[in-house]
Image (cartoon, grey):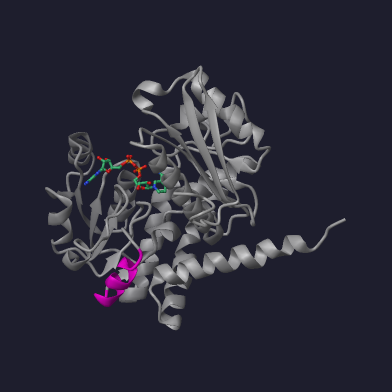
Amino acid sequence: MGVFTADTGHEQVVFCQDKQTGLKAIIGIYSTALGPALGGTRFHPYATEDEAVHDVLELSRAMAYKNAIAGLDLGGGKAVIWGDPATDKSEPLLRAYGRFVQSLGGRYYTACDVGTYVPDMETVAKETRFVTGRPVEHGGAGDSSILTAWGVYQGMRAAAEHRWGTPSLAARRVGVAGLGKVGKHLVKHLLDDGASVAATDVYEGALDWARSAYPQIDLIDSVDALITSDIDVYAPCALGGALDDRTVPLLRAGVVAGGANNQLAHPGVEKMIAERGILYAPDYVVNSGGVIQVADEIQGFNFERAKARATRIYDTTKQILALAEAEGVPPAVAADRTAERRMAECGRLRTILLP
Ligand SMILES: NC(=O)c1ccc[n+]([C@@H]2O[C@H](COP(=O)([O-])OP(=O)(O)OC[C@H]3O[C@@H](n4cnc5c(N)ncnc54)[C@H](O)[C@@H]3O)[C@@H](O)[C@H]2O)c1
């Protein structure tokens, strides 16, 4: 994918290489209209360079929308490190990467993503101050899945209220696909609210965790079996692309609200969901609690302040669902319009010269 020829709209894409450590990284900045770009670093063994470029362009764009709708004064960016985190990750490589982040002078703040963890950010922080997701003991926000799950729960409550007139999930049956970092925390909030939970995961360790921590969870064999079972809410919490031409016709839930990024497999799926009468709470609206958590670190981390902000995902989701209804468009379209409006209107204010 060519940045110029495909007219992706990105401000800046930086290729970073250090032969000695084997670092090959790409930092994508979609927009700094609202402030410095914030987004995590994905460490992944892409099959080709094109695939890595495609991923960083998509992910950085999505971060701009997520940060805008979360009300953060931050733009959207993301980075990918092309390599296998299991074999290629080393202190020198991460520090070399940190130096490239520093070289952008604060136009981009990094954080954890798939393949990078809190201790990695501590290593990156030896070379740059433009890093979040550091350990709590070093003043960092730590594991962002805590407020991601809290925010998903708030977004789900808003969707339930829009659909059934009450935000309570008591007596609702929620199907959670993926019992990873986000899914595990989400399950607790749901059970505390009185919901019954059905769940599935491909990883035996995650199922063992569920059996011992919450024996009341109904464990289901596969995602297909979960979505065709009698559930009120479907919460995709594994990988992207959960909603596609094959799965949408199978869905039995009245509401979809989950933590996974990029749930819609391609443009047009949002329309299929709406035509089936299913209420979709847009992924980047409800899963913005994680970026809210790490963004708080920039001004000195305060968990209660970050949690209060993530709690407002309930209000934001309600507003988006109401706007979608008023404008007669799917919620995903209403969310995009809202994010674009904030980037354009607040970003424009910088044209007013301040002496
Ligand atoms: N961690 C965060 O703060 C955060 C923030 C925003 C969005 N997200 C998104 O939420 C999703 C989950 O993130 P996470 O941090 O919990 O990741 P994770 O890797 O801890 O958990 C993912 C879980 O999904 C399971 N899984 C994978 N494929 C599956 C399949 N086909 N069927 C069933 N289960 C499957 C895995 O075994 C794993 O247990 C991802 O899409 C991520 O991008 C995470």
Q: Residue at x 19, y 62 (%)?
A: 246
Query: How far across and how far down the image is residue 122, in percent?
Result: 53, 27
Q: Is residue 148 left or right of residue 131?
A: left
Please check the rendered image and state whether residue 276 is part of the magenta-colored stretch, yes or no: yes
Report ligand 1 position as a quadrant: top left
Q: Is residue 13 left or right of residue 265?
A: right
Image mark count:
0
For residue 235, which quarter of the picture? bottom left
What secondary structure characterizes most of the magenta part?
A: helix
Q: Residue at x 38, y 50 (%)?
A: 149
Query: How far across and how far down the image is residue 27, in percent?
Result: 53, 40
Q: Is residue 32 left or right of residue 303?
A: right
Vertical order, 122 against 302 (above or below)? above
Vertical order, 320 against 311 (above or below)? below
Q: Residue at x 40, y 22 (%)?
A: 88
Query: How far across and how far down the image is residue 188, in percent?
Result: 31, 48
Q: Is residue 118 visible?
A: yes
Please check the rendered image and state whether residue 314 is part of the magenta-colored stretch, yes or no: no
Q: Residue at x 27, y 71 (%)?
A: 272
Please name whichever residue, 71 or 215, is drawn nearer the observer in this view of the structure.
71
Q: Is residue 146 visible?
A: no
Vertical order, 204 against 152 (above or below)? above
Query: How far across and how far down the image is residue 101, in percent?
Result: 60, 34
Which residue of the protein is positioned furthest toward the right in this rendering? 355
Q: Is residue 232 left or right of residue 186?
A: left
